[in-house]
Amino acid sequence: MRIDRIDHLVLTVADLDRTVAFYTQVLGMTAETFGEGRTALRFSRQKINLHVRGAEFEPRAAHAGTGTGDFCLVTETPLAEVQQHLAAVGVPIEVGPVTKQGALGPMRSVYLRDPDQNLVEISVY
């Protein structure tokens, strides 16, 4: 077997509406409803499915909880523009810009927190 790519990941959140607002308004994702009232955040060819803490869908992570995510999102937007946008919408950068090693080589990154305190890295190759 050879894995090709990530299709989606799941975040457990405390406040669905607050999370959807953050990812759509700050990061430009699109919210969608699927299945039996489930919510996802779509971007490019991937998505983030959302579970509300205490009402998770099965199957789920053995220890699902808020604020346990740590992931990297790649953008083609210049990092200076990303920084300007984050400042304009009042989202503080926790770390960066810094040089990191991504799956495709060196990249420049900034780190921020979502409403559940997940660590979100935004990177440019």
Image (spheres, helix red, strand yellow):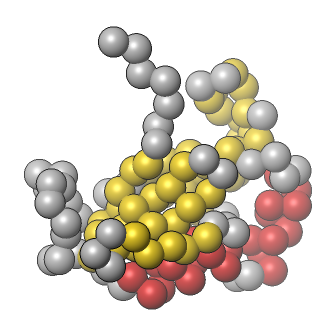
Q: Residue at x 44, y 48 (%)?
A: 8
Residue 13 visible? The answer is no
Rendered-image quadrant of the C terminus: top right
Residue 56 shown left or right of residue 73 in the figure: left
- Residue 111 location in percent, x, y? 61, 55
Q: Residue at x 50, y 31 (%)?
A: 5
Rendered-image quadrant of the N terminus: top left
Residue 39 shown left or right of residue 79 in the figure: left
Which residue appears farthest toward the front when viewing the image?
35
Q: Residue at x 19, y 66 (%)?
A: 57
Which residue appears farthest toward the top when viewing the image?
1
Quadrant housing residue 23: bottom right
Q: Please state which of residues 28 and 98 is positioned toward the viewer in this rendering.
A: 28
Residue 123 shown left or right of residue 21 in the figure: right
- Residue 81 location in percent, x, y? 88, 61
Quadrant housing residue 30: bottom right
Q: Please state which of residues 95 and 2 is positioned toward the viewer in this rendering.
A: 2
101, above or below 30, in the image: above
Quadrant housing residue 13: bottom left
Which residue appears farthest toward the left when viewing the image?
62
